[in-house]
Image (cartoon, rainbow, N blue to C red):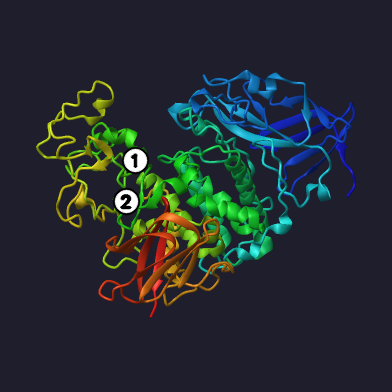
Amino acid sequence: MNAQTTNEITINRNGVTFTFSFDCNGGPCEYGKFVTGDYWIATNTPIGKVNLNGITPSGEINGAMLNPDLLRNSSGELISLDNQKQGILNMYDHYSSDLNLMTQLPANIEGNSSVFKISTRTSNCGTRAIEDGCVDTAVVLTILKEVPENRGANLFRPPFHGKEKPFYTTDKVKLNRLPKLSQVSNGTNGIIGGVNGYEHWLVPQIDLYHGGMGEFHRATIPHASQTPYAADQAKDFLDDLGNLFGKESDEEKRAAVYSLLQKGIDNYAIYKMGVSFQSGAGQHLGKKPPITLLGALYDDTTIFEDIRSIASNKEAIEKRFFQEDAQVKMGKSGMAIWGDELGVENIHWYFARMYPNIDTQGSAADPYGYIDGPAGGIHPDDTQTRDRNYMGVAGGPIIGYAFLQHLMPWFKHAAGDEEVLLWSDRIYKGYGIDGFDGGLWTLPDPVAPRDLNESGNCKPFKLYSTGISECTKYMQTWGPVESNLEEFIGHGKDPNTHGRMPELHGTKINFNRLPSLTRNLWNDLRPCSDPNNASYPCEGLGELPEAVLSTDEINIEKETELSLSFTKDTFKITTIKNYSEITVDLYSILGKELTTKKDTGNSTTLKLSKKKFNTNSLYVYRVSLDGEVYSGKFLLRK
């Protein structure tokens, strides 16, 4: 392909004109475009640098950053989130002009670098928390040391965060793994998203500030092209991905797929940099599905295995790298439950929040792991509000994420997260659970509710400040055990009928951000995407990965070499490593514990009583290997 040289690149985006002026050793630089339309320039000089002379829109207010990252110490480790700074929006207290490339021009930039550039708006930012200013739109210019293969025509733009600039090629994108469902389209819609695909996902978002800067991460959303709230972004991404599940040809889907994969490439780089996206209400959602899609469609075993391992990575979950992974976990009664784990250090806040009107945390998990969160908004007295329940905000995109996994087995295989699937089936429609048609899970629950004789002035959270809670029964008849806050005070009754809020078991949740494909086609497509249903498989269901084993054997995780095998009489686990403590719990789909066993070594077998286990019935397993937990569903066949 012929060389192209220039001293200036102009990009028009969302009504804003961006220009980059530069030279290579005093002359023009070679330039070109990646497959998604982003520009690159090559240094093509002995010193491998580009002189970046000017960028518009001008002014410090329209910030730019080079290889955006969080601040790190001399060892390369992240400094505390409370001490982090940003260099794009100069109207905030945590702004540092030293990080803003607009204050450094002209600048000598090394090859293999990314220039992230924004235009700023100072009104219509969507929420009072960021009313001082926000990103309007943004672009990336990639500076390379040499001209890329095929001049970048079959390459994705490398991630703009951080210093690592790996290339991803379109040659490895497997479009045949997408479903071709007639229910989604009739095959005559033409090019999905237009000639350039979903251009709104090609507008880059700097995504580093989910901790330590309050609501600032919302200001980084490119407001001119994407909805300015992460829960809405999550729904929109899943809606766009669902539109690719129809009968259109690969060519009609190609540009749109590339747009979504570019988002996945950028998010995956942030994860590899060790930067957490956090969890919470709806402000941090939607960061994991693009990465899962990258793992599903990109034909690279190393990347696939790395992405698949995230959902079971204990450190990633504890640090809340992704809300989709951290917010849903297997409960102690065998049912997946929802909520953010806030730790025993917040235990008094949990019991205080359980009975508002003092709630400020509507996504807190049950610290004892039996029932759905949140702690707030669940008082059984109907005269008090239950509005502080963010499950309705966060749950819709999580359910949509699970539903698309069922329709696209490669997507499910890359996600590696049975907990999300089990929770979504249960909370939305009670799928696969006889006698339960969806809703909250609050039984069984052995934890004592608030003592009705407790003082009306009782505020357990005051124990953190004054030490005077004005409680008379707290930590005596309800709440945590005072000598060990990790233990709870029980009610001593039947946990299948009593607990903190038994009257809410099965209460329906209004999911206000449910993706349209889930809302419209769940009843039609969920049964025929279920291998245990007679209507399986749906015509046009996505290709089944060869690595997915039959229903009588499950390979849980390559790193541990844990496998499960089961017959109508036995349930056996086998590992390569030896473990000092193996615990296996088997539950009914309703959460009732049926059998448990503790062992050591690398193998254990449970006998399945015919009185408790029926063939052609669905059950839940929970395996703990020295504290590492693996869980999911299994079907006993005849």
Amino acid residing under circle 2: Ile
> 338 or 156, which lies in front?
338
Q: Quadrant of residue 205?
A: top right
| Image coordinates for residue 179, horizontal then vertical, percent | 57, 66
C-alpha span from label 1 to label 2: 16 Å
> Where is residue 618, by image quadrant?
bottom left
Q: Mark 1 and mark 2 in contact? Answer it, CB < 8 Å.
A: no
Q: Is residue 147 above or below residue 590?
A: above
Q: Is residue 595 above or below residue 280?
A: below
Can the viewer see residue 187?
Answer: yes
Element at label 1: loop
- In this rendering, the count of numbered labels is 2
- Counting from the top left corner in percent of width and height, residue 26 is at 89, 26
| Residue 364 badge | 1
Q: Element type at marker 2?
A: loop
Q: Is residue 68 left or right of residue 82?
A: right
Up the image or down, 271 lies above or below 209; here it is below
Q: At x 46% / y 30%, what residue is drawn?
A: 215
Q: Which residue is mark 2?
A: 509
Q: Amino acid at mark 1?
A: Ala
Quadrant into which the C terminus falls = bottom left
